[in-house]
Image: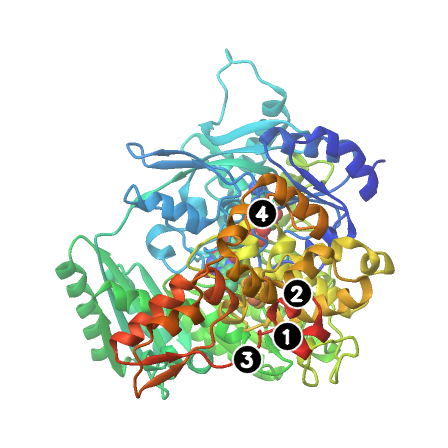
Amino acid sequence: MKDSPEEIHKYLSPLLEGEVLVDRLSRLLYSTDASIYEVEPKAVVLPRTVEDVLRVVKFAGEEGVPVFARGGGSGLAGESLGPGIIVDFSKYMNHILEVNEAEGFVRCGPGIVLSVLNEALAGYGRLFGPDPASGSRCTLGGMLGNNAAGMHSIYYGVTRDQVISLEAALPDGSLHSFGKESKEKPQSEPKDNFHLAVVEPLVGLLQESQPLIQAKAPRTRRNTCGYLLDGVLKDGQVDLARLLVGSEGTLALITQAKLRIYDLPKAKALLILHFDDLDKAARAVPLLLPLEPCAVELMDRSVIEATREAFPEYASLLPGELAALLLVEFLGGSPDEVGARAEEARKITESARLACGTSMALDAASQDRLWEMRKSVTPALLRLPGDKKAIPFIEDTAVAPEYLAPYIQGQKKILEKYGFQAAIFSHAGDGLCHTRPLVDIRSSEDVGKMPQVASEIYDLCLSLGGSISGEHGDGLSRSQFIPRQYGALYEVMRQVKDIFDPQNIFNPGKIITRGQDIMTSNLRRLPRVEGLYPQNRLAFSAGEYVRELANCNGCALCRSPLPEVTMCPMFKALAEEGASSRGKCNLLRYGLIAALGEEEWAGSELQEIFDKCLACGMCTVDCPSGVNVLKLVLDMRGRLAEEQGISRASRALITFEALSRLCSWFAPLVNYFSAQPMLRFMLEKITGLDSTCELPHFSRNNLKRHLKNNSPGSDHKVAYFADTFASFSDPEIARALVSILEKSNIETVLPKQKGAGMPALAYGSLKRARRR
Ligand SMILES: Cc1cc2nc3c(=O)[nH]c(=O)nc-3n(C[C@H](O)[C@H](O)[C@H](O)COP(=O)(O)OP(=O)(O)OC[C@H]3O[C@@H](n4cnc5c(N)ncnc54)[C@H](O)[C@@H]3O)c2cc1C
Ligand code: SF4
Ligand code: SF4
């Protein structure tokens, strides 16, 4: 058996065009996702081609090594984690292959990020309908794996509803197309092994299980629990693509998808309904549905308060005294039409004495602001202070909308009984509840209560005909509870798994399991350290270091390729997990809990990963949990510099401020020579600075000289603390600012200024930075 990391690398690496990573740091980087779990894999493969995927799968099948598909790693239930080979589709297999406007479909690789796809489709006046809140970084492969949905599912449906066909690899390393086909192949057509071993037995099994499938179908439109067997056989046809969606990479690895697309909506109206009681808000939902809104979103008091607190810019949209609010959106052909439907919705809820206030957003800017506010809900909950965090473990149960009110009441009673406070928000139009109890996963008392709380809430949900998972899948959080939802049908699901994956190599332990305590096993480790952490080089207050690391919940926003998400430029450039802010936080956490051995501390790889940070500070602005990743990185760089020394190139860059001053004096000469390849080559030999890097251009007319020659003088003065680049390299920016101030009759003054010491800080020379 070739199942050690080294053997996997030795065997696979020559076979693949993509990357095979088996070093310990890469394995740790892929040990977590956005869930509360961690499992260390043996290897990480970043396939470039479909052939790469097939070779990995064939190897895994022959050697009995489990394989775990992964997209953005934004799953909340630990669906993509496992102790085998992780296949990350996001780096290379992320292309749009065809947009067919006439037939209304797109074909793409599984690693494409949803928002990237939608930006491209917008150019054709189209969109992909399902819109999970994680759309800025989740991939289509992950959405297919989870059957993801979002705020507009009552209009567009869930991911499963969009699939025309899929191409996917089976555990024997073969590639097949999955889509609608006749249940029985005509006698004249030859039957290949795939038909004999997979299609025929599946059709037989599903046919005989139809009564059970019907009986166990939850009475809610939202269901991602177990295998989705309903609708796979329909009208004399079998559609195995419908079975693969939601199977969380346990049946096949999707290598390509053909998906339905929609026209962009012409007109929208957004109604905001205020409530003085959560129960009234939940009771209003079924009254609104006959008007066919495209979204009905509910926020409870604790969610409203957390959002006001974390993001004061939204406070005006969220009056303090509210117990709940509903956002109700209508799409249609004209502003008048959607406006009239929204008005009708307002009247209905007011005359039923449910809503106590309303407002309407008819223009695109106000609507966007409201949806941005709604998307800030999870980040706001993640910013709640204290050790207890709003963690996902029972976070996506679903019932029919008419049962939403009693269901929420019942949940609250259960949570109160166990002493858990919780925040509830909901895709109410589909009866889907995001319930987030405040739990300290370092407390054995809290962890001990989690299975009991889940168990009682699931029983309540099932008693109302609901599903224990309506959106985020089963993963490690819910797989042990699936038999409770399906009873005897779970045995049919077990047979489905056996037909597809008899060796159990695809994502074993998820969906099909005999485990009883998976939900609370493999929880992320984080020690409770109240005081100062002795290894820190920068100033941290008591407990701050651990708190920062605990606050990184893995949400993966720092993996977003979108330009409007400013964090993390290093990930955008390299598309590597280690380059992201999340990667850094995870490695620091492993450092803290002593999971990094001497070898990792001594090797150059750790330094290389921490070098992949521009020190731009955008994470301090954009991170939804407010984690100051920059400070953590700089602290680590200081430590690594002390222990391993500072490279020649870093030393050269540390002197950049002083050098810039000098170079600006001799700018024409410096600029000429620095453009000569020979001189760049020599510079590389002396300083270690890569000769392929473009060197900054210097200006003789630096800012100081410019002001001396041009300042008109004024009684109104502004002190300008210009940085090195504005002073010596790009003075145009500084001059532009100065001329704007001049136009307002303000004189710019350059105070006597020492260098900021940022290069020294950024390259780990903390002593030198302090001297500054
Ligand atoms: C802040 C936040 C908000 C979220 N909001 C929503 C929401 O509104 N709605 C929602 O549905 N979800 C939501 N999620 C959960 C999650 O982001 C989505 O379900 C998303 O679709 C997962 O995509 P991913 O690329 O990150 O997948 P991953 O987490 O990497 O994987 C998810 C599953 O898909 C499987 N998979 C991945 N690629 C393939 C492939 N090529 N072939 C077969 N299987 C594959 C994996 O094995 C795994 O089982 C949210 C998560 C976060 C952190
Ligand atoms: S660093 Fe921030 S954005 Fe990145 S995963 Fe952690 S919490 Fe999310
Ligand atoms: S400071 Fe570093 S980790 Fe933070 S966003 Fe910038 S490059 Fe990424």
| Mark 2 vs mark 3, CA separation in Å | 19 Å
| Amino acid identity at mark 4 | Cys
User: Residue at image x 32%, y 36%?
Assistant: 104
For the residues carrying marks 1 and 4, which lies nearer the camera in this image? Answer: 4
Marks 1/2: CA–CA distance: 9 Å
Q: Is residue 507 visible?
A: no
- Read off the residue under disc 1: 548
Labels 3 and 1 touching (C-beta < 8 A) = no
Residue 215 image offset from top left, x and y in percent:
50, 50
Judged by depth in the image, the label closer to the viewer, 3 or 1, is 1
Residue 239, compared with residue 72, is above or below; it is above
For marks 2 and 3 on the same chain, the one whose residue lies earlier in the sequence? 3
**Is 316 situated above or below 68?**
below
x then y, percent, for residue 653: 64, 60
Earlier-in-chain disc, 4 versus 2: 2
Q: Please name the residue that numbered disc 4 is placed on.
A: 693
Q: Amino acid at mark 3?
A: Leu
Q: Quadrant of the C terminus?
A: bottom right
Mark 3–mark 4 Cα distance, whole angstroms, equals: 43 Å
Question: SS class of the residue under badge 4?
Answer: loop
Tell me if label 1 and label 2 are in contact, CB under 8 Å: yes
Q: Quadrant of ligand 2?
A: bottom right
Q: Provide the secondary structure element on which disc 3 rests.
A: loop
Question: Tag 1: residue type?
Answer: Glu
Q: Which residue is mark 2?
A: 585
Q: Nearer the viewer, mark 3 or mark 4?
A: 4
| 3D distance between C-alphas at marks 4 and 2 | 28 Å
**Mark 2 residue CB less than 8 A from any atom of ligand 2:** yes
Image quadrant in which you'd find residue 526: bottom right
Q: Are marks 3 and 4 in contact (CB under 8 Å)?
A: no
